[in-house]
């Protein structure tokens, strides 16, 4: 498994692919008419002066967009419809019937969920979709985040850690149920991020893009031969599942349960059987993992019900009184405490209906300074103030479209399942050092619970336990009564 991920192939978009061809006169005229009718004909302003390859490139790009649909999105974004308001939104926690907690739930229930999830894995009913995101520029790297080395003693990347967790959960399912288990891994990449991974059960597909729009609703040109575009947000994943053929691949495999998560969480339990079993037992269409909010001031989005519908409400939308409210049954904890970590479950039957609800998802507006071409002079312009908008969707925009009885939420331990990598090393928060520390301390807890004694002689405390050895702390009986000097790595039984 290590060789699969370490053997990264440096591929850039277009390499090895057939170059676009210049359109025929008839094809060109037809596309021109589409854009002209939509009052977006200016995108062909410089077409006649382009080289043949540039003409082919622009034609191919414009062919992927529906100008009438772009106009509809631009109109809504620039002139949002007035909505009637009956006062502040009514916020309530999700009903207890829809929740569970790794902190508070009955251990027998959690074991039941685990066993059910492992059974589903053994029957090849589970798939994983990884939202791999973009490049790690904030981390000081031009490589995708998944390739980042957070500084573990093993120097494993995020991709390798997650791939090994899939391998381990397959192994656990096979041993428990005596069946060959396969968890297909679908990787959702932004443009330019391609990897040479195992092609048998690892498939990657691209995030979609949308044209950038000027403040007066016109499609912006990045150059004379290219439309300015921006990724359509992680909410674009739903449409991408269709256009990439991933949903069809899931259908052919008989997948019934899909786990989706973000690459930058080094502690992500990929294809987590507890999570899968919980959602399957509840018979819901969407479930989500949350961690307990640290305190009333932590800047996190919350999973709750808003006006009777499941939703994510950002911290900026919650007033001080609501943020500080205590749980009436457990006054020692917050009433609204379910912090969103973008870790979700979908039933495949729900994804089968994407066409019936995807058009209802809102597009969020980001006003930006977008480099573009001046249509009069043909010169490139770098604006000093926002000159247009980028449109994106969020993966959780679908939550309010889901009936409350078909939505569930499970609370997990932050120290076991959530350590995001967002910032450059040295910032002290959500950076490579904290990610490394969280994995090392988790391993230390695991081996100590298994009966080992960890000796620490400096600040580099902790033990890195390979996912191939243990998925969640199980199978470490071989370290009992042994002394382990930190920092240490356990890749196989003989390492302890």
Image (tube, rainbow, N blue to C red):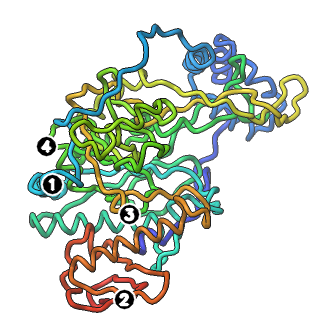
The residue under label 1 is 110
**Residue 162 numbered mark, or none:** 3
Quick one: 12 or 157, which is closer to the camera? Answer: 157
At 43% from the left and 18% from the top, the residue drawn is 88
Tell me if 93 is positioned left or right of 177 in this view: right
The residue under label 2 is 455
**Residue 281 numbered mark, or none:** 4
Task: State whether residue 437 appears in this view.
Answer: yes
Neighbor class of circle 2 (other Cα within 10 Å; few <14, some 14-19, many 20+) is some
Please report whichever mark, 3 or 1, sits nearer to the chain's N-terminal start: 1
Cα separation, mark 1 vs mark 2, equals 32 Å
At 52% from the left and 64% from the top, the residue drawn is 147
Cα separation, mark 4 vs mark 1, equals 11 Å
Residues at circles 3 and 1 in contact by the CB criterion of under 8 Å: no
Neighbor class of circle 3 (other Cα within 10 Å; few <14, some 14-19, many 20+) is many
Tally the marks. 4
* Quarter occupied by residue 86: top left
Front tag of 4 and 1: 1
At 18% from the left and 67% from the top, the residue drawn is 172
Tell me if 68 is positioned left or right of 167 in this view: right
Residues at circles 3 and 2 in contact by the CB criterion of under 8 Å: no
């Amino acid at each position: 498994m290590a060789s699969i991920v370490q053997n990264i192939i440096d591929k850039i978009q277009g390499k090895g692919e057939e170059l676009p061809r210049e359109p025929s006169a008839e094809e060109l005229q037809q596309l021109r008419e589409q854009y002209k009718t939509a009052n977006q004909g200016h995108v062909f302003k410089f077409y006649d002066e382009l080289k043949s390859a540039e003409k082919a490139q622009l034609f191919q790009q414009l062919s992927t967009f529906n100008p009438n649909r772009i106009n509809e999105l631009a109109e809504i974004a620039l002139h949002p419809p007035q909505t009637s308001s009956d006062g502040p939104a009514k916020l309530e926690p999700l009903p207890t019937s829809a929740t569970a907690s790794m902190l508070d739930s009955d251990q027998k229930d959690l074991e039941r969920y685990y066993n059910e999830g492992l059974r589903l894995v053994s029957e090849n009913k589970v798939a994983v979709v990884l939202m791999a995101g973009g490049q790690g520029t904030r981390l000081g790297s031009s490589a995708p985040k998944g390739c980042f080395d957070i500084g573990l003693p093993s120097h494993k990347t995020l991709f390798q850690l997650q791939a090994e967790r899939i391998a381990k959960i397959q192994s656990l399912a096979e041993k428990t149920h005596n069946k060959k288990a396969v968890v297909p891994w679908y990787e959702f990449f932004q443009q330019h991020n391609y990897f040479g991974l195992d092609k048998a059960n690892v498939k990657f597909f691209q995030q979609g893009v949308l044209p950038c729009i000027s403040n007066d609703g016109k499609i912006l040109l990045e150059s004379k031969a290219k439309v300015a575009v921006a990724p359509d947000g992680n909410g674009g994943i739903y449409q991408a599942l269709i256009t990439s053929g991933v949903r069809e691949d899931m259908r052919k495999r008989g997948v019934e349960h899909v786990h989706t998560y973000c690459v930058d969480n080094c502690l992500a339990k990929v294809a987590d059987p507890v999570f899968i079993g919980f959602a399957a037992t509840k018979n819901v269409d969407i479930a989500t993992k949350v961690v307990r909010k640290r305190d009333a001031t932590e800047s996190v989005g919350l999973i709750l019900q808003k006006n009777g519908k499941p939703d994510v409400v950002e911290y900026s939308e919650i007033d001080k009184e609501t943020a500080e409210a205590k749980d009436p049954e457990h006054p020692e904890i917050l009433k609204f405490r379910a912090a969103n970590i973008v870790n979700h479950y979908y039933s495949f039957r729900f994804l089968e209906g994407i066409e019936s609800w995807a058009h209802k998802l809102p597009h969020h507006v980001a006003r930006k300074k977008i480099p573009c071409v001046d249509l009069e002079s043909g010169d490139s312009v770098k604006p000093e103030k926002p000159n247009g908008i980028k449109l994106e969707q969020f993966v959780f925009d679908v939550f309010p479209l889901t009936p409350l009885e078909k939505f569930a939420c499970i609370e997990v331990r932050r120290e076991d399942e959530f350590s995001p990598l967002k910032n450059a090393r040295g910032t002290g928060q959500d950076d490579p050092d904290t990610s490394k520390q969280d994995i090392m301390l988790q391993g230390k807890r695991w081996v100590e619970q298994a009966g080992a004694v960890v000796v620490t002689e400096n600040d580099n405390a902790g033990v890195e336990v390979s996912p191939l050895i243990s998925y969640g702390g199980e199978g470490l009986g071989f370290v009992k009564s042994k002394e382990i000097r930190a920092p240490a790595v356990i890749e196989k039984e003989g390492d302890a």
